[in-house]
Amino acid sequence: MPAVITDTLRRQIARDFFEQFQNNTADYYVAIGRSEQWDSFETVPTPVNNPDEIGDFRNGLQAMKRVLGTSLVVPRNNWSQGTIYSQYDDTVQGYPTQPYYAKTDNNQVYACLETGRDRFGVAQPSTIEPTSSNNDSFRLADGYVWKFLYTISAQRQDQFQSSNFMPVQKQGSVDSNSTGIELKQKEIQDSATPGEILSIIITAGGTGYTSAPSVAITSPTGSGAAATAVIDSATGQVARVRMDGASLNTIAHGSGYTTANVSFNGGGGAGATARAVLAFSDSGVGADARTDLKTSSIMFHTMLEGDDSDFIVQQDFRQVGLYKNPLNRAGARFTGTTSNLLTKMKLSSIVTSFTKDKLIEGQSSGAIAYVDDTDSNELYYHQTDATGFLSFLDGEIIDEQNGTGNGVIDSALVYPNVDTLTGDILYIDNRAPVSRSLTQAEDIKIILQF
């Protein structure tokens, strides 16, 4: 039986994640791991969504840091002169090939309500960058009708803007401490008009028109919308319909429409048909930018500083993951900011120093592991399917298989504060090796798309 998951559900899932973070009902961490090479050529494999892959990720974990912030995000579309933008259309599933919204050089975000068209009805490139922050939609000289939604602050750019995504939010309550950007977005939200007709799209041009017919918009609920048709005299068809406006800044979208019928009268022809495009939200364009822009993605952001506690340096990692609700060794909720996730052993004596990334082997147990870090008489290590998971023994001698390191174990198994077998792995990103040092920081942004 045919069925579809609606955009509403996708938006709700994204918002649920966002609200869990905002309400502190779930703990999210960015985790890094895998110090060993992918292969001799460092060919990065595509992650596989199965329990074995998740288990491998857990085995190689090095450290994690609490997510600093989250934001709902949408695909980033920079306004570019010469681009043909789609107008918002309530019959389009997902995002159209040509975007219907744009971010300007001033980091202002606008929705395109009507594409500029010539007298033949052919879509034209956008040539004038929108700059107005009026509460109402406005038409520019190139024919495009835009609606200002919000401005992305410098702070939110730093945290939640990437080359492919940009942040979006609904502004909550404001007060005397609110910024101008926040106050303006709240003003846009509160002034949104429910039930507007955003545009009229021709579905059939008809035949025989010698003059422009009048456009009739009828509805059992709404009022105030008005539009004008233009014909192509060479073909006798209705070529374009524009929403009326007493000026470039006053567009006759009307209000209160839940349905609308469009018809053409006069002009000497027949057969032209069109449909009205209603706002996606019942509250009107601008009332909730998350809805206007079909937000169904969320970004998790954190910054790994070179000297972050619990993160090893002079080592590399090849995996980044999103870790939800890990528990400590006592089975309670872990709430720390950072945690080392590697098992370690303490050595009673070191004959020859050990080296990171070498393989160590216990002479009695036969256990094998990768060395991740060394610190005085402590050695941090991890095991994988390739090394096996035999346990090292207290008191046994360990040697490096591919080096000269040699020593005697005092305590073979010292667990980290976090039980890495607990919690949920929500996301895994395989990548080329990233080497960590005290003088660098990794700005990590994880995006979940639903």
Image (spheres, rainbow, N blue to C red):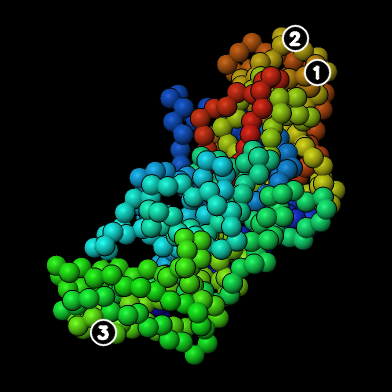
Label pair 1/2, CB-CB below 8 angstroms: no
**241 or 277, which is in the foreground?**
241
Q: Earlier in the sequence, mark 1 or mark 2?
A: 2
* Horizontal relation, residue 353 to residue 334: left or right: left
Residue 266 marker: 3
Say what amino acid the circle numbered 3 marks: Gly
Which mark lies nearer to you, 1 or 3? Answer: 3
Q: Residue at x 75, y 24 (%)?
A: 307
- Secondary structure category for the residue under label 3: loop
Which sits in the foreground, 278 or 248?
248
Which residue carries the number 1 mark? 377
The residue under the point 82% across, 28% down is 411
Q: Nearer the viewer, residue 89 or 340?
A: 89
The residue nearer to you, when weighing 156 against 47, is: 156
Within the image, what quadrant is residue 201 found in?
bottom left
Q: What kind of element bears circle 1?
A: loop
What crowding class fits label 3: few (fewer than 14 Cα within 10 Å), some (14-19), or many (20 or more)? few
Residue 85 visible: no
Q: Earlier in the sequence, mark 1 or mark 3?
A: 3
Q: Which mark is residue 351?
A: 2
x 43%, y 76%: residue: 226
* 165 lies left or right of 309: left
Of callouts 3 and 2, the N-terminal one: 3
Q: Are marks 1 and 3 in contact (CB under 8 Å)?
A: no
- Tell me: residue 274, above or below residue 64: below
Instruction: Give the side of residue 141 with respect to residue 319, left or right.
Output: left
Q: Quadrant of residue 313?
A: top right
144 lies above or below 190 = above
Position in image of residue 173 (x %, y %)? 77, 61
